[in-house]
Image: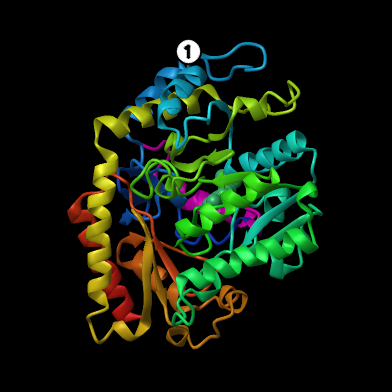
Amino acid sequence: MSGVSTEEADQLYASYAPHVTKGLGRSTEGVIKKASGSRVQFYDGREVLDFTCGIGVTNLGHCHPKVSAAAAKQCMNIVHGQCSIAFHAPYLQLIERLLPLMPHPSLDSFFFWNSGSEAVEASIKMARTVTGRQNVICMQGAYHGRTFGAMAVTKSKTIYSEGVAPLMPGVFSIPYPFWHQCGLPPATSPHTLVSQSLYQLDLLLAQQTAPKDTAAIIIEPVLGEGGYVPAPTEFLQGLRAICDKHGILLIIDEVQSGFGRTGRFFAIEESGVKPDILLIAKGLANGFPLSGVISRKEITDKLKPGSMGGTYAGNAVSCAAAVAVVDAFKEENILENVRARSTDLLVGLNTLRDDPAVSPFIIDVRGRGLMIAVEFTPSASGTSHDPFAQAHSPKSFASRVAKRCIEKGMLILTTSVYEVVRFIPPLNSTKEEIEEGCRIFAEAVKEV
Ligand code: PLP
């Protein structure tokens, strides 16, 4: 049980919510009392199905008993250790668990940090240091975080339309295939879109950032905040070939798509492409702050000791929680469940397209595993198809649907681009929970 009464929670919300910095976002739903599995309880008595997993973090459900128990046990041993002086055991146990799961056996060098953004910044610093080159290429539509360095390679968020200048010079971008085509009738074939993006990359390397100046290309194998768009295998393989040709490092950001979300441990496995640097976070410790930067010893041995890390990096409690997460994956057949529930979710959402009352509003249902997006037609909201215009429209159709879902008992997320809602259910969801989510969503779309 939480430590405060309902009256105290109401009082706290009324008195102190206005003191929370506005930049955090709009927390209008009150105070959460308790969260367990796929359910979240509010102090006002509401209990809702959580199909956001705290933005893809509590992948095994809230307060997974074994993860919470491992963290609690670790709290009584050692909470904080200085890894540059002496390791704590969970740090090394986590490497032991992760090594066999790597999407390529060459990935054999690990360090842990707290957040996805820190991992992104560390990877760019690492790439610049070991290649001795300055420039970085990212994808239009990508999201890599909100810290200043991570923002510099982020191209999907409204932060750019709000006049915040990117911190890092030397960042270039190419189109993520399909991103600009999302929801539009496919005028060009997937193959053409991939070729066009790779051609843009060739142009960039010929005209703006010479290979000898280019340290890294960073990409999400499934665009997350950009609207759950999987990168075509052909594109990822094309990037790998160009990186190999020019000695550029390929950074695969699996902060959101990693740890089982797509039905594989890592989304990149589907393409067979080898990352030079792999980034993980979110689901890694099921809610405890932890991220990982994983590369090859051959690369990381070039770093000066002490050039990576931070005060809280690789926290012992988070590492102990992550060890329990990896163990739970095996014990609970999580990957198999993701694949089965993914089919249920896709069937449920696609059924909606057969309903004449709803089908005109839905133009796409897409994603991988339990990382599924529904995109509405621009006409549903009466706004343009310009992502920034949509992002600035507080009453977009998608946000009204998401709001209605909350009122009806389910949390889902929208994106800042296009008219997209995202389903991120726990990876151990049951068939019944997925059906419940689909039913609430169908009713919400009809009512809005
Ligand atoms: N990279 C990706 C792909 C993400 O989805 C996110 C967060 O949503 C980040 C990086 C940033 O992670 P964090 O919010 O933990 O800094």
Other-residue count near label 1 (Cα within 10 Å), few / some / many at <14 / 14–19 / ≥20:
few
Residue 150 belongs to the span the image colors magenta: no
Q: Secondary structure at mark 1?
A: loop
Instruction: Please state which of residues 237 and 316 is positioned toward the viewer in this rendering.
Output: 237
Which quadrant is the C terminus positioned in? bottom left
Which quadrant is the N terminus positioned in? top left
Which residue is located at x 48 percent, y 42 percent? 282
Which residue is located at x 35 percent, y 24 percent? 69
- Residue 299 image point, x, y percent: 66, 30
On the question of residue 126 being in view, the answer is yes
Residue 20 belongs to the span the image colors magenta: yes
Residue furthest out toward the left:
432
Q: Which residue is mark 1?
A: 77
Magenta residues (range): 1-23
- Residue 31 image point, x, y percent: 45, 51
Q: In which quadrant of the rendered view does residue 422 lie?
A: bottom left
Instruction: Please state which of residues 219 and 42 is positioned toward the viewer in this rendering.
Output: 219
- Residue 255 image point, x, y percent: 52, 45
On the question of residue 157 being in view, the answer is no
